[in-house]
Image (spheres, helix red, strand yellow):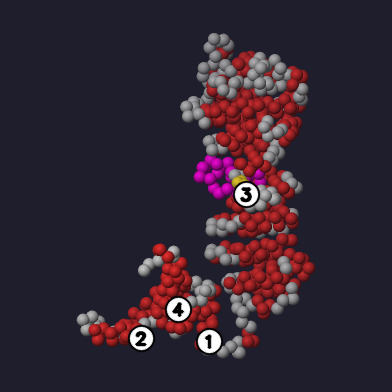
Amino acid sequence: MERTRTVFFSGENPIKSKTVLELLALVLSERESEERWRRWSRQVVDAVLPLLASGRIRLESREAQQALNRVLGAAAPSVLRPADPLLRSLFAPFPNPNGSLVAVQRWLGGVLALVLLLLSHGKEDAVLARLEELQLAPPPSSPCDPLNAAATTASCGMDPDQAVARFLLRVISVVGKRIHKEAFNPAADPAWDYLQEQFAHFLLYCIYMFESGSYCKVATAAMEMVQVSPTDSLVGNMNKIFLELAARCPLLTFLWCYLLILLGYCDRSFWASILRTKPVPLLMDEGPVETESCGPSSCVNLEVVRKGGTILYCDFVCENLSDAEQLTWLLVNHMEHVIQLSTEPPVQELIAAVHRHSTASGLLVHAVGSRCQDMRQPSQVSRLLHCLEGVHPSQSGPLLQLLVTKLLSLPQLALARQAASLAARRAEVLLALGREQAQAQLAAEELQALLAELQHHRRHSGLISVLNKLASECYNLQSSEFDSGTNIVPSSIRSIVVDKNWFLAQVKNRCSQGCLSGRDSARLLSKLQYEDVLLVLSCKEVSPKILQHCIRLGTQLTLQAYQDAGVPQASYSDPATCIELQEKMQELESPLYAASRAVLLQHVAHIKSLLPRPHQPV
């Protein structure tokens, strides 16, 4: 021990490696004698704390920091009480942010070790009482007091809890500025990577201090400082720095956002930058500026910050659900991101809390209908349906409209059936609520529109049956008017005359509605004569896309007719035989092929007429 103390107390040679610290930790871990352990602990603490305050212990590596933590952690707890030496060393003068990187690392390493000791051994009331007795305060931010002569609570006029809160914010400011300088310096010192790690640990200590409740008074003081401070103050400047660091140091930006959430910081401009909300200018000057979320960024770090920020902001809104403005801003501008992250516990809690309130649940349904336009990703649609399952019963009508109009036509059959099942359950909820409440949520005209929409989705017969029951019991509508999948009344089947005109009307109706594929439409048209095919294909309601199927099928039918008739291979040297062969081939030509060719030429001629006169072919 005496040899160790000789090396340790050498004034000319500060500790150059973690070896001495590890040796001290090993010595303090030997607890054969309680009295000797306390005496050695007192000697080590009395020697280490001044060296920490003056930056003479080299803490430029993770191993050295861990060795220092082991030394202070192995010391007897009694020598750390009262916390006067710890507080004096903690409130030492701050280093120059633009000075040596090593000096900043050593100072921050000492702050980390001392804050860890206060969190693990010190009680808030005892620490604040000693701080008030010592009249310590953070050093001023201006360089006019380099000796820190004004660093007292009496001269600064602040309570001890305010002094600790201001100290933590000042540390974040000093280190954040230095990291910002190194991040955008092409000739930066490679050692600044470890400074990021140190800073992340400090932010985690602050988060633990505020979230655990061990320092409630300090958290309250910090909350007041953050919420009442103007945008150009310390917090406003730090926000600018962390926003610029998002592309280089996403973890630090995320931890800063986490800290602000704990302090109740809800400045809209800052969170709009974190969540990447872009303004959309209006054509009219009246009214507020609408906003919407930007698309995914090509920078992975920015996407990490945005997703993490969205989760944090959802947690904040869930804790302050009475603030309708924050909830509206989040759901209207970032509904797709909320659904994308709906598997995260904070987002799940927010969605569950929203659905417990009728107005908030209705706002979510409206936001989904107006903002969620991209339904191409099956995973996103699946998460959306999961989010809509807990909608408040008073919003069953709007939810039913959303499901029928937007989700029943999905190309994924499993998702469409899941949406139809949810819609059927919501229709049953309306049935259970009774006539008045059902009509208050869903008007008769809206129900008729839904039933008309379902005529194009005949695979959802169960949903149609429930809606028919709802129409008859709550709206006095005849269910036969909305028979599942057909407009034909059973009693009128005998009066239908099945003839050529009826078949032509059916073919024209099927081709114009687009309920059949192009191949099926071509098969129906192949049963008609030339004039009838030409009449159907010339209708404006019929899509020109079916022409390719008609020409393909018509060509096949024509070649099959040639083969069945045994058309011979004639020589073009005999004009009479050639003319006779062409006439026979025209007779065997499929009416579908001839009509399709004629309609195609009509479209070509129409496009040609639209060209400017100098560009029209001769």
**Distance between mark 2 and mark 1 Cα atoms:** 25 Å
Label 3 packing within 10 angstroms: few (<14), some (14-19), many (20+): few
- Mark 1–mark 4 CB contact (< 8 Å): no
Residue 523's label in the rendered image is 4
Q: Secondary structure at mark 4?
A: helix
Residue 501's label in the rendered image is 1
Which residue type carries mark 3?
Answer: Pro
* 42, above or below 534, in the image: above
**Distance between mark 3 and mark 2 Cα atoms:** 64 Å
Q: Residue at x 64, y 24 (%)?
A: 114
Residues shaded magenta: 292-314
**Distance between mark 3 and mark 1 Cα atoms:** 55 Å
Residue 281's label in the rendered image is 3
Viewer-proximal residue, 130 or 461?
461
Which residue type carries mark 4?
Answer: Arg
Q: Residue at x 67, y 42 (%)?
A: 268
In which quarter of the view is residue 241 placed? top right
Which residue type carries mark 2?
Answer: Glu
Viewer-proximal residue, 481 or 418?
481
Q: Secondary structure at mark 2?
A: helix
Residue 587's label in the rendered image is 2
Q: Secondary structure at mark 3?
A: loop
- Mark 4–mark 2 CB contact (< 8 Å): no
Q: Mark 4 or mark 2, which has the lower sequence index?
A: 4
